[in-house]
Image (cartoon, rainbow, N blue to C red):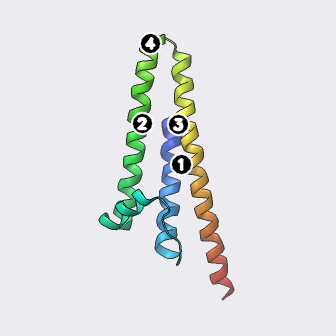
Amino acid sequence: MSGLTLLVVSKIADVVTTAVGLLYIPGITELNPIAESVFQSMGLIVGVVVFGFSVVFCVALAVELCVCELYRLTRSAGASVCLRLGAYGTLSVVYFYAAYRNAILIADNVSIWLLL
C-alpha cells in the first residue's frame, strides 16, 4: 500500500469518526480551532469533507515536491522512499490515533445510551 493511500485511508477514518461524534454525541467538540472555524462557516458535513481533502492535498503536494527536490539533489530512490514513508507514515499514525480516540468516545456514549 502506498504512503499516500495510507494517508487517505487514515484521514477518511478521522473524518468519519469526527463527523459522527460531532453530529450525534452531545458534549463532543472539535479541538482544532482551524477545523472548528471551517466547520462553522461551511456546515459540519461539507466542512469536515473540505477540510479533510484540503489537508491531504496540501500534505501530498508538500511531500511530493520535497521528494522531487531530494531526488534531484541526491539521485537516491531510497532517500525518496524514506521521506515518503516518514511523512505519510507519521501523519497516518496521527490520523488513525485520532480516529481511534473518536471511536472510543462514540462507543462510550453509545454504551451509556444503551444502559438508559
Q: Is any atom of residue 2 visible in this view? A: no
Q: In which quarter of the image is the N terminus?
A: top right
Q: Earlier in the sequence, mark 4 or mark 2?
A: 2
Residue 69, visible in the rendered structure: yes
Residue topped by disc 4: 73
Badge 1 marks a residue whose secondary structure is helix
Label 4 to label 1, Cα distance in Å? 31 Å
Of 94 and 16, which appears nearest the observer? 94
Viewer-side label of 3, 1: 3
Q: How many marks?
A: 4
Distance, label 3 to label 1, CA atoms, is 10 Å
Residue 36 picture location, percent across and down: 41, 63
- Who comes first in sequence, dot 4 or dot 3? 4
Residue 38 at what x, y percent from top left?
35, 60
- Kindly identify which residue carries mark 3: 88
**What amino acid type is highlighted by mark number 3?**
Tyr
Q: Is residue 36 above or below residue 13?
A: below
Identify which amino acid the numbered label 4 is placed on: Leu
Is 79 situated left or right of 64 in this image? right
Residue type marked 1: Ser
Q: Circle 4 sits in a helix, a strand or a loop, which is it?
A: helix
Of the residues tagged 4 and 3, which is closer to the observer?
Answer: 4
